Amino acid sequence: MITIYGSPKSSAGRCFWCLEEAGVTYQTKSIDFRAGEHKSEAFLKINRNGKVPALVDGDFSIWESLAINNYIADAYKPELLGTTAQERGLISQWSIWSVADLQVPMIDAFIQLVFVPEPHRNAGIIAKAFEKLPVMLSTLEEELEGKEFLVADRFTLADLNVSFVVGICDDIKFDLAEYKNINQWRSHLANRDGAKRYKALCA
């Protein structure tokens, strides 16, 4: 039995979505950070960094959400990783870009807008984050021109990982109205059974 540690409403969400796409049975365990469960001896054996998400599959454990998704796909639904070296390379490229570049300003804004009380928010950080996003989103918009999926002609981890990050725009109220291709792509992905099952977990 697979055990996923974390909440579908957190960065672990991409892992929950991947599990749903892979169609495997799993159980969920939440970690009470206020009670210090993330620093417990038992959890540190799973992730010595004391962070979620983490996944246990039998006697194997792994952490970091992109690595977890790669493992899930490799073990249970390999086509999500691509079927050629070129596809696998491009899927890695887009997945890494989503967290190393696109996600960074989004999280900067997210912290200010979601966790910091309004009187104490740093408007400069928010403005700087919002200034960076159009260039990055334009890169994705151009890539999706005339395409249903980012890589090849089918759903892969590239679509899952990148669209999960783009979804942060909803949380920070960044207007995506001008990005026709991104919006069509997101709507198409949202109609997948795996995506619907994941979204139901967040309700």
Image: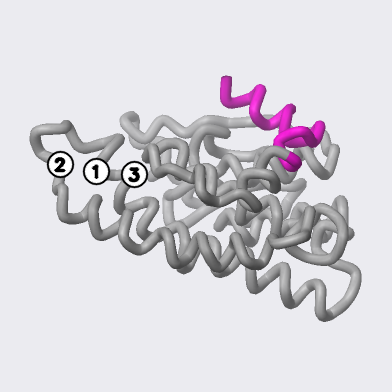
Which of the 4 quarters of the picture holds residue 73? bottom right
Alpha carbons under labels 2 and 3: distance apart: 11 Å
Q: Main secondary structure of the magenta part?
A: helix
Which of the 4 quarters of the picture holds residue 94? bottom right
Q: Which residue is mark 3?
A: 110
Q: Position of residue 52 (x, y in %)?
A: 49, 46
Q: Which of the marked residues, 2 or 3, is nearer the chain's N terminus?
A: 3
Q: Secondary structure at mark 1?
A: helix
Residue 112 is marked as 1
Quadrant including the C terminus: top right
Is residue 201 covered in magenta? yes
Task: Tell me which residue sits at (63%, 54%) in the image.
Answer: 161
Q: Which residue is mark 2?
A: 121
Q: Position of residue 144 (x, y in %)?
A: 69, 61
Task: Tell me which residue sits at (50%, 60%) in the image.
Answer: 137
The answer to whether mark 1 and mark 2 are in CB contact below 8 A is yes
Alpha carbons under labels 1 and 3: distance apart: 5 Å
Alpha carbons under labels 1 and 2: distance apart: 6 Å
